[in-house]
Amino acid sequence: MQRCPRCQRANPPEASYCHNDGIRLDTVHVQDGDIFRHEWRFPSGRICRTLDEFVTGCLAEWTEARNALVRREFVKFFEENNRPDLARLVPPAEPDAEIALQNFLAKLPSKVKVAPALDVVPRRLLIPNVSKGEERKIILTVLNRGNGLLVGDLIVAEGSRWLRTNTDRIRARAEQPIEVTIDPRGFSNTGSYFARLQVRTNAGTIEVPIQVDANVRGTPFQGFHVTDAQDLARIMLSKPKLGAKWLADGSARKLFANEGWKFPLEGQPLAPSLGAVQQFFEALKLSLVPTVSLDAAGFEVTCEYPEMITRAVTLSTTSKKWVYAFVESGAFWLKPREAVVAGGRQVDVVFDIDSEMMEPGRIHEGVLHITINGNVEHTVWVRVDVRKPFEPWSRRIMKPFGK
């Protein structure tokens, strides 16, 4: 007598299938496509009696199948069905449970093939009439027209200066929207610009060509068309002396005021010569602020009243950039020769010490406040020992007593 593994009713010894429900009675060795001795049931109520139904069910109930893989329930299930060969195929869930499930289902000897299929909609992008200052956002959809998990990378192969995406990873069971942003600040002029976006996945690679027709409208300025502050900076980079002139005579400031742009050096004193161009670039964060060092942190000076002493602080940088500084005195007898200085890679802050403005016979202390590139402030202290003027002995003995 044989009992049905499903309904547990008795059947004749010679029967191959249950006379009541038609279930195969020989379940000692379950073959591909045959009925499991113990069926697999998902929490939704879906029942899987064969290996094909099991793979199809895992693809349809992806989240529950992933959780079962993490809990190692598949190992127990196949062992109970006398299939240790399939139990050995169950991988560890770490580090990525979904990829582990994908690989596991693909290895099972089932007629249901686990293979994602890549598609991208649209396959080509044409964005016309893009103006300066007008960002464009386009949605690109990555589709999985197969089954399983589609994983891969999104790469801007060309046009990275003006094209960016909200993600560089592809991970889709059905579809994944990708936000593509066109930044027209990367356009130098009108015309067509081209880019390539590559979608590289475990189901192959698709390249999406992108064409942007830029209509850059600029403001006439000194014979140039300027669209924004960075555009003006690019012109200054190619013509630094002309840029220094525009900053010095106020033309650049007036342009910003007329266009309603925020002037980057508002409220700041202007460095002389090409130092102003360097200052302008630093304020726009288009140039790194160089590291500037001072050759002296302070001075000790001895002089005789009313002698005038001259000293200097050297500011220098190892970068191939201009150094500029704004100098203020903290004592009336401490007199900088220039309030603003600038020079290529090195500049001297020269100052005079006027002992005529100090009381002789005592020590005086004062400071110089020096503000350099990037509004970095330094304080240089000056300590002066003012000696009384020399008098011959004959003049001293002729003085009245007590004077």
Image (cartoon, rainbow, N blue to C red):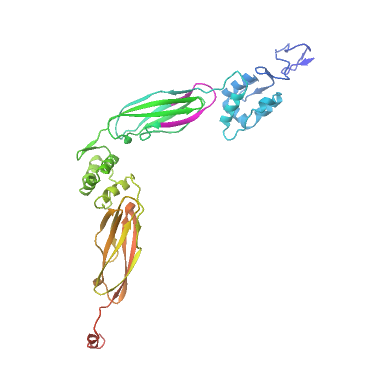
- Most extreme residue toward the right is 1
Q: Quadrant of the C terminus?
A: bottom left
Q: Position of residue 98 (x, y in %)?
A: 56, 30
Q: Is residue 352 left or right of residue 59?
A: left
Image coords of residue 399 (percent x, y): 23, 87
Q: Is residue 73 magenta?
A: no
Tell me the quadrant of the picture where the N terminus can be found: top right
Q: Which residue is drawn at 22% across and 85% down?
A: 395
Q: In which quarter of the image is residue 13?
A: top right
36 vs 276, nearest the viewer:
276
Indicate the position of residue 397 as horizontal and vertical percent values.
Answer: 24, 88
In magenta, the rendered stretch is 141-156
Residue 327: x %, y % from top left:
28, 59
| Main SS class of the magenta portion in the image | strand
Instruction: Note whether 90 is above or below 343 in the view shown.
Output: above
- Which residue is at 62% across, 23% downward? 108
Q: Using the rendered view, name the quadrant where residue 262 is placed.
A: top left
